[in-house]
Amino acid sequence: MNLRTGKQTLGPGYAARTINHALTVISGFYEFHAGSGAGPVVNPVPASKDRRAELSHRSPMEAPIHVRRARLRQRVPKRLPRSLPDLMWDELFEAMKNDRDRALLSCYVSSGARAEELLGIEIGDIDWAGQQIYVVSKGTKAREPVPASPDAFRYLAAYLSQAGVPKAGEKLWRALRGDPRPLTYSAMRRVLQRANAKLQTNWTLHDLRHTAATRMANDPKMTLPEVQRVMRHAKLDTTGIYLTVRLEEMTEKLQDFYTRPRQVPKFAPGYDPEDVRAVFGG
């Protein structure tokens, strides 16, 4: 566990989610080939008969059903989204060394776009007048607009004034050293790793999407359906998980609560203090 962020560090071996994902992929591979007659009749990946029976005719509107896991399937703990508190966000932003990285982080934390979605944009995907960026959504593969903050566009303009405007069809984000080439996910991840090493944190690019969703969902002037539209979630329940309150984000409120003087009970005017003392004591 990282003491500054409260996030778990990578442990030895494969994570439970990775194991379950691999089992699902392998099971689907054998099911496909068994259906076409090109594979074994029996799927070698163990399946839960109870789960198949319960989910066969279940409506997606019904409450989740808890059934026994199949053999080899791992128990996956429920994890809440980890957003950056404001002070730690300021530290991370100050650790960026150039306008490209500042523009990228500002776009991530204000638009809520996924890492690969934002890295894949071109100069024609920038709507300067509308303060929007067009990205290709991960699930639907549709080209959709996402908003971005004025600060993000200012840093983006500063980056383009230094690096030059790319040609049509070229990626917007490019490497700053070596031969001209698009900025890859691995390279951007390395930028964040260097900042983490300096700050002794373990933030990820996806944490920036969580931060954007948490800030929007907890803003009193924004409704949950509006946040769902910005984040492009398929279900409103997914957006609802960002309404949770984290203890580390309540530091100022808790300090005010602890130092607030105790309220002295007051009685309605007109009562004789001696009568009140005789009835209630004190």
Image (cartoon, rainbow, N blue to C red):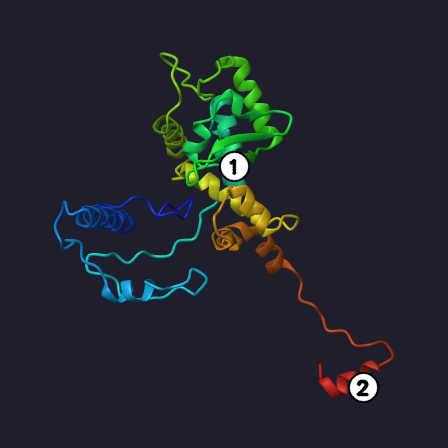
* Residue at x 56%, y 24% (from the top left corner): 155
Q: Is residue 132 left or right of residue 178?
A: right
Q: Which residue is mark 1?
A: 109
In the image, farthest residue toward the right: 270
Q: Residue at x 60, y 24 (%)?
A: 154
- In the displayed structure, 186 sits above or below 170; it is below
What's the residue at 73%, 73% (across, down)?
265
Q: Residue furthest left?
A: 40
Residue placed most toward the observer, 23 or 55? 55
Q: Name the residue type under label 2.
A: Asp
Residue 236 placement (x, y as % from top left): 51, 53
**Label 1 to label 2: alpha-carbon separation:** 61 Å
278 sits left or right of 156 in the view: right
State whether residue 46 is above or below residue 182.
below
Q: Is residue 125 above or below residue 168?
A: below
Q: Residue 215 versus residue 259: which sits nearer the camera?
A: 215
Total marks shown come to 2
As drawn, is 29 to the left or to the right of 152?
left
At x 36%, y 12%, the residue is 179
Q: Nearer the viewer, residue 32 or 64?
A: 32
User: Mark 2 sits on what residue?
Assistant: 275
Q: Earlier in the sequence, mark 1 or mark 2?
A: 1
Quadrant into which the C terminus falls? bottom right
| Crowd band around label 1 with a 10 angstrom C-alpha radius: few (<14), some (14–19), many (20+) | many
Say what secondary structure mark 1 lies in. helix
Numbered tag placed on residue 44 in the rendering: none
Q: Amino acid at mark 1?
A: Val
Q: Tell me which corner region of the image, top left, top right, bottom left or bottom right, holds residue 271.
A: bottom right
